[in-house]
Each structure stands twice: as structure tokens, then as C-alpha cells.
Amino acid sequence: MDYEKGDPRTIEKIMEFANNSELTGAQRMGVKRAPYWPFIPVENYAIPLLHLMIGIFNDIIDYFTDLFDTQIIQKGDDELMLEDDYKKMDETIQKCRSDVELFNKSSLGKKETNLSQDTISKRSSYKMGML
């Protein structure tokens, strides 16, 4: 292609890059797909600067909040106990989930699942007046 870095972008060039499947990586000059509205010239596009800045600001706030919570502010005994309890509950839930998954894979679990589905199906049919 006859495009050099620094040349102004045009819709025609963007369409060429988008439609050329032989180009990969940096050769595509940042073009991932054809524009949704190729009839709007590039000069009429606006960068949503406010939205970009809000996103960056949110990332900075999240970073500092995490930094303060983990390294600067000391946690009280109650908070430490609650965190420990939360971790224990989470571990218990994960173990229960894996136990349920193992049971569902067993022959008895498959049989129980089929019985439950049959019961639900019959109840649904009865409520809809099919039985």
C-alpha cells in the first residue's frame, strides 16, 4: 500500500486496510474493521475525550483505593475476623459446589436429576392443563 506513517487518514485508505486480508499486525496501521458509516469523512470524527479521561480517572482512583486498603490503613480486629470468616465461607461454598458437581456426575446423581426433571415436567404439564 502507498501509505506512510504520518499521512492523513482517509475513509478510502481505512477501507483499503480493512478489506485487505493479507495485511496483519502493524501493516494494518491500527485498522481492525471497516467503519460503520463510511460516508462520514474522517475529518468529522471526534474523540470522546471526556469518556477517555473518566475511564483513566476511575483506574487511578481504583489503584489508590486498593493501595490504601491493602498497605496504608490498618484494619481493626473486627474487620480482620470478618475477612477471615468470609474466606472460610468462600472455601466452604467452593467445596460444596465441587461435591455437588461430583454427585451430579455419579450414576445416582444422574438418576436423581432425571427424576427431578420428570417431576418438574409433570408439574408444569399439570399447571398448563395438559394432564
Image (cartoon, rainbow, N blue to C red):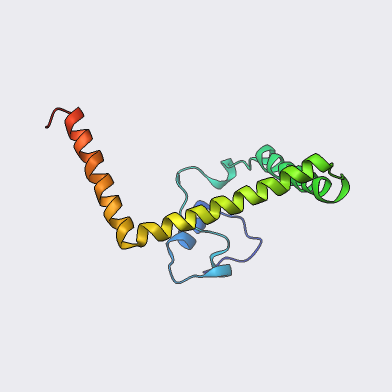
Q: Residue at x 88, y 48 (%)?
A: 72
Q: Position of residue 120 (x, y in %)?
A: 25, 39
Horizontally, residue 64 falls left or right of residue 29, namely right
Q: Is residue 32 above or below residue 67?
A: below
Q: Is residue 12 visible?
A: no
The percent coordinates of residue 2 (x first, y second) are 54, 68
Q: Is residue 62 left or right of residue 99?
A: right
111 shown above or below 44: below
Residue nearer the viewer, 75 or 115:
115
- Res 4 → quadrant: bottom right
Residue 12: x and y in percent read 48, 55
Instruction: Give the residue drawn at x 34%, y 62%.
Output: 106
Q: Residue 12 or 19: which is nearer the viewer?
A: 19
Q: Farthest residue to the left: give it.
A: 131
Relative to residue 43, is residue 33 drawn left or right? Answer: left
Q: Residue furthest front?
A: 108
**Residue 50 pos. (x, y %):** 69, 37
Nearest the camera: 70 or 78? 78
Number of on-image labels: 0
When the figure is inspected, residue 45 is found, relative to residue 88, above or below; the finding is above
Determine the image quadrant of residue 47. Answer: top right
